[in-house]
Image: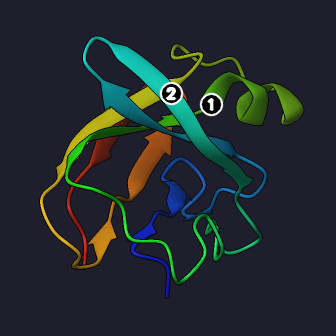
């Protein structure tokens, strides 16, 4: 399993959000560099965001979720064009960062 995983649930529909583009960035001083990009599958997950053998160095990272694109494809007006979740990796353990999404709000937490 990838060290970092995510999934997106569309709480307005009560089901996974398929087709959300997700970018992973790492912070270097005040700059962010892109590491990878993925798109959620029918289960709202990206099973291969990172290869299983990649261990992220300790530091600040962010996941950027392209939410406007997702809602536009459904013909739904939304308030947030994208959502950035910034978090800190401190060691080699698994990190799961889920996003609960609707057109006018969102929440996240550190999952397992």
Residue 24 is tagged as: none
Q: Is residue 84 above or below residue 40?
A: above
Could you say whether the residue bearing mark 2 is in a helix, strand or loop?
Answer: strand
| Other-residue count near label 1 (Cα within 10 Å), few / some / many at <14 / 14–19 / ≥20 | many
Point 74% across, 58% down: residue = 18
Check disc 1 and report the residue beneath it. 67
User: Where, by quadrant of the figure, is residue 73 drawn?
Assistant: top right
**Which residue: 22% across, 43% down?**
87
6 left or right, relative to 21: left
Quick one: SS at disc 1?
A: helix
The quarter holding residue 41 reads bottom right
Within 10 angstroms of label 2, few (less than 14), some, or many (20 or more) residues? few
Q: Position of residue 39 (x, y in %)?
A: 74, 54
Left of 26 or right of it: where is 112? left
**If the image is split into quadrants, where does the C terminus sit?**
bottom left
Whole-percent x and y of residue 91? 15, 68
Q: Which residue is mark 2?
A: 33
Residue at horizontal 54 percent and vertical 47 percent from the top: 12
Select label 1 or label 2 by which is in front. 2
Spatial CA span between label 1 and label 2: 20 Å
Q: Is residue 4 above or below residue 66?
A: below
Q: Quadrant of residue 30?
A: top left
Coloring basis for residues? rainbow
Between 50 and 39, which is closer to the camera in this rendering? 50
- Vertical placement of residue 61 versus 41, above or below: above
Q: Nearer the viewer, residue 63 or 104?
A: 63
Residue 16 lies left or right of residue 56; in this view the side is: right
């Amino acid at each position: 399993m990838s060290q970092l995983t995510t999934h997106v649930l569309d709480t307005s529909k009560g089901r996974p959000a398929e087709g959300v583009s997700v970018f992973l960035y790492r912070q270097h001083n005040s700059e962010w560099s892109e590491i990878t990009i993925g798109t959620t599958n029918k289960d709202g997950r990206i099973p291969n965001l990172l290869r299983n053998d990649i261990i992220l160095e300790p530091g600040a990272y962010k996941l950027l979720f392209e939410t406007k694109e997702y809602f536009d494809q459904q013909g739904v007006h939304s308030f947030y064009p994208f959502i950035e979740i910034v978090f800190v990796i401190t060691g080699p353990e698994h990190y799961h960062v889920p996003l609960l999404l609707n057109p006018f709000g969102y929440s996240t937490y550190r999952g397992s």
